[in-house]
Image (tube, coloured by chain):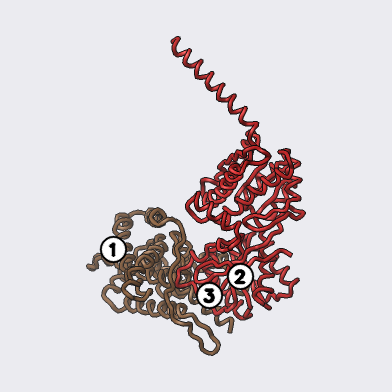
Amino acid sequence: MEFLLQIINGLQIGSIYALVSLGYTMVYGIAQLINFAHGDIIMVGAYISLFSIPVFSRMGLPVWLTIAPAIVICVLLGMLTERVAYRPLRNSPRISNLITAIGVSLLLENLFMKLFTPNTRAFPKVFNQAPLSFGGLHLNYGTIVTIFLTIILSVGLQYFMKKTKYGKAMMATSEDYGAAKLVGINVDNTIQLTFAIGSGLAAIASVLYVSAYPQVQPLMGSMLGIKAFIAAVLGGIGILPGAVLGGFILGIVESLTRAYLSSQLADAFVFAILIIVLLVKPTGILGKNIREKV
Amino acid sequence: MKKNTITLLGLSLLMVACGGKQEAKEAEVIKIGGLGPLTGPVAVYGVSATNGAKLAFEEINKAGGVLGKKIEFILLDEKGDSTEAVTAYNRLIDEGIVALVGDITSKPTLAVAEIAAQDNMPMVTPTGTQFNITEAGPNVFRVCFTDPYQGVILANLAKNNLNAKTAAIMVNTSSDYSDGIAQSFAEEAKKVGLKIVAQEGYAEGDKDFRAQLTKIAATNPDVLLVPEYYEQTALITTQAREVGIKAKFIGPDGWDGVAKALDASAYPAIENSYFTNHYSLEDTNEKIQNFASAYRAKYNEDPSAFSALSYDAAYLVKEAIEKAGNTDKDAIVKAMKEIDFTGVTGHLNFDEKNNPVKAVTILRIENGNYRFDSVIQPK
């Protein structure tokens, strides 16, 4: 029984990693860019929902609805950073993109520290529903919402990629940037859409995150971003189901390490996973070995 | 040219005259040094603490000073840094201080204590809780209780006041503070017959504690000890309720501020929790109320526990000098050792390691407010 609960604990953290990781993996798959500012989008989302709560509660709306302004602002922010920071560097060496990404991350972190002080702020309870108990199993409402929402969103995203025009344009762009342009796909818009979807998922993740850890702070996104990045690499960067799988595995590994080995080893295990994956199968669990043509 | 020379001569004469006057005044005052982080990252603690000492010395001077002389309190800023603290201490020595009230945070306090031990300078730290500070030398005293002392009190609180039979501990294994309290709690628990059913650890900066708390929940303890500062405590207690822990939460003085780290909607998680503190503003004790109103009148805010401890440290030094009858260092240290002192933070005398044996105030959290619950006397 306890083991089962530990797995569920792991799935809850894992779900948040998975949602963030989807953004990493999509952007990497399509723009060949590791967007290190992605974790900070979550921080922005958390602040947006924190600040919109007073307005929402005055209108008598539940706290979780603040997810809406968070999504809107994060999507706009994602599109803006793409337009301002990444698009001008589209044809530059990849290292320039990486440096810009780190720059955007630092900019967001320091901007929020300057605006709202580095102090931690308390976040209200997102889900007030009573915990569900069945068969002696005691499950928190937020945990269940987090896990199910993640599964629904990732299945939906996969469907979007496979079945819709825009999804197909994304796939084509990721396959071959130049050829996609030749067949008439608006590559710029497609990449911007990718950033928008990734940031929207991050905004959802931010509200799920503060429902589990009710504190908001300007540096909250940095470690989360790194973990999500590891999840993306573990599952195979650029592959959507891989990101979700990677996130879940990471969460469960963390939870089981904390419960049965040692809490200090949890982060060590996570980073060890990254090293092992890079050594043994750099393409990740679901990645295929594709030889680059010369 | 000539005019300039005369002006210069006049000026220097004036300066000599002033200097002379100051020297004459020096013999009439007793100089006491003060150290604290007045700027820098921990300035919040330094300012609120030293404000307490400043208030105390002002009161003492108004009441006629000590040994018929006024006290001059020389307060220097050490920016929360050990090196700065030692430099500042040396400057205080040059000024001719007879005793030191400070330092405030543990690390610089230890650095100063080691140097002060060589001079046998009577030193009282109001707030340095780290255990080995007073081991620097027989001249080093403290007013606050140590980390392990809180563990002992908390075990007694759980057993006697809360009627607990079983306890669990959630300890930050990378913090001396947390570890020290947890260890002494476990030892004392064994003595008083409180069974420790689970002890789980976590690392600094962790945000997710569900794995450890799920294990604790399975043992269904009566109380859960969380020896941690308030930010982490806020996360641990809310997650503990989420995984179904029904135990009462207890914690040390680091909890002061926990309600601020939580939104009001999360207050039910910490409702009816208990933590130790140095004193309570709600305590109707006359000494406490007088201090609080004097402090509010002077600084326009409520005194913190740090202010109260520092206020007591100042009065402690004053009493020791009075008892010694002169300002000889050895005499003051000897008087301090034998002192029987009652201050805002309670009655104290010193044990063989110069740690105070004093009563601890217990606060109970009620709807986000810290209510005065009781005072636990030392055995």
Mark 1–mark 2 Cα distance, whole angstroms, equals: 64 Å
Depth check: give the residue in front, A74 or B130. B130
Residue B101 is drawn in which quadrant? top right
Mark 1 Cα shell of 10 Å, populated few (<14), some (14-19), many (≥20)? few
Residue placed most toward the observer, A132 or B254: B254
Q: Is residue B323 left or right of residue A210?
A: right
Q: Residue B264 location in percent, x, y?
A: 45, 70
Q: Earlier in the sequence, mark 1 or mark 3?
A: 1
Q: How many marks?
A: 3
Residue shown at 30%/79% (left/top)?
A163
**Residue picked out by circle 2:** B250
Residue B365's x, y, as percent? 54, 69
The answer to whether residue B234 of the structure is visible from this angle is yes
Whole-Å distance between the Cαs marked 3 and 2?
Answer: 30 Å
Q: Residue placed farthest to the left in the image?
A: A184
Instruction: Spot the residue most to the front.
Output: B63
Asked whether residue A176 appears in the rendered view, the answer is no
Q: Categorize mark 2 by other alpha carbons within 10 Å: few (<14), some (14-19), many (20+).
A: many
Give the labeled residue for mark 3: A252
Residue at point 53% right, 83% down? A138
Which one is closest to the eye, mark 3 or mark 2?
2
For chain B, the rendered hue is: red
Disc 1 from disc 3: Cα separation: 40 Å
Q: Which amino acid is tagged 1?
A: Gly
- The reply to whether discs 1 and 2 touch (Cβ–Cβ < 8 Å) is no
Q: Say the numbered circle drawn on residue A178.
A: 1
Mark 1 vs mark 2: give the one in front. 2
User: For the residues tagged 3 and 2, is the chain the same?
Assistant: no
Parent chain of label 3: A
Query: Residue A195: x and y, percent?
Result: 33, 65
Task: Determine the chain carrying the residue at label 2.
Answer: B
Q: The chain coloured brown carries which letter? A: A
